[in-house]
Image (cartoon, helix red, strand yellow):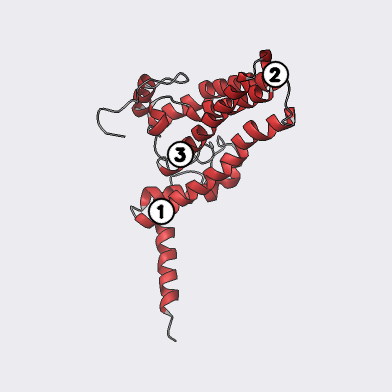
Amino acid sequence: MRVPKSEIFKSKTSFCVRFVYKAEQPPGPRFHSAQDPPLRQLMGPALALPQFALRSVDSPLVKFMMRAYAILATVCFLFIAPGTIAGLIPWWLSRWRMHAPLLGFSAIRILGVLLIMVGIPLLIESFARFALQGLGTPAPIFPTQHLVISGLYRYVRNPMYIGVCSVIVGQGLFLGDLNLLWYAVVVATGFHLFVLAYEEPTLRRTFGEEYEVFCANVPRWIPRLRAWRRATSSL
């Protein structure tokens, strides 16, 4: 009985994937540990294979697939997280109804529009770099493979959070809604605590000295006037 070439190719491909994955599989639980968050435990098989494949196979095709996977996941996270925090919740709080301009100055509405116009590109550019350069997402369940230190990250370490707050404050100023401004204060405080308690310690453990150098040269919240460039490479 003659086996079609297509079936032989599928069989060889499947064997290679299984071989590479098993060779790179670390000792212990296959996809997660007890310390992993519940969502990562559920998504473990889906997240583990692309990351092991990227480390194991120096192939343009694998890297292309990994980048496409990262872009798709990043787009989904963009709509879920910032879309909710900077869009859905402000709409729920204000119904986007116009009030009298704050302090009686109509020019404040223009400032609000400018903040929104600045915040949205900040978000999009920051998210894009996570997928294209970091080969991951801002979501903790699918972190980046590389430390993202290009683009806006050469000026400030958290442009994504600044963009979200800018959009919220912009809506509050444009609509003349004090509730949105108070909400922006709550969101900014939450971001700050999250960065201090989780994000920065995690990045230090993951990237070590590279992240320490980054922190020493790029501010957490107040942007630099000039872009930081590493002495060893051009970004």
Nearer to the camera, 39 or 35:
39
Q: Which residue is mark 1?
A: 64
Query: What is the quadrant of the C terminus in the image?
Result: top left
Q: Is residue 221 left or right of residue 109?
A: left
Q: Amino acid at mark 2?
A: Leu
| Residue on which disc 3 sits | 130
Residue appearing at x 43%, y 81% in the figure? 3
The tag on residue 178 is 2
Give the residue drawn at x 51%, y 21%: 196
Q: Residues within 10 Å of mark 2 (few under 14, many from 20)?
A: some
Kind of residue at disc 3: Phe
Q: Observer-nearest residue: 229 or 144?
A: 229
What kind of element bears circle 2?
A: helix
**Image-quadrant location for residue 149:** top left
| Viewport quadrant of the N terminus | bottom left
Residue 40 can be seen in this image:
no
Dot placed on the residue nearer the N-terminal end, 2 or 3: 3
Mark 1 to mark 2: distance in Å?
46 Å
Compare marks 1 and 3 and give the one earlier in the sequence: 1
Residue 219 image point, x, y percent: 42, 20
- Label 1 or label 2, whichever comes before in sequence order: 1
Which marked residue is nearer to the observer: mark 2 or mark 3?
2
For residue 16, above or below residue 5: above
Q: Is residue 14 visible?
A: yes
Q: Amino acid at mark 1?
A: Phe
Q: CA distance from mark 2 to mark 3?
A: 33 Å
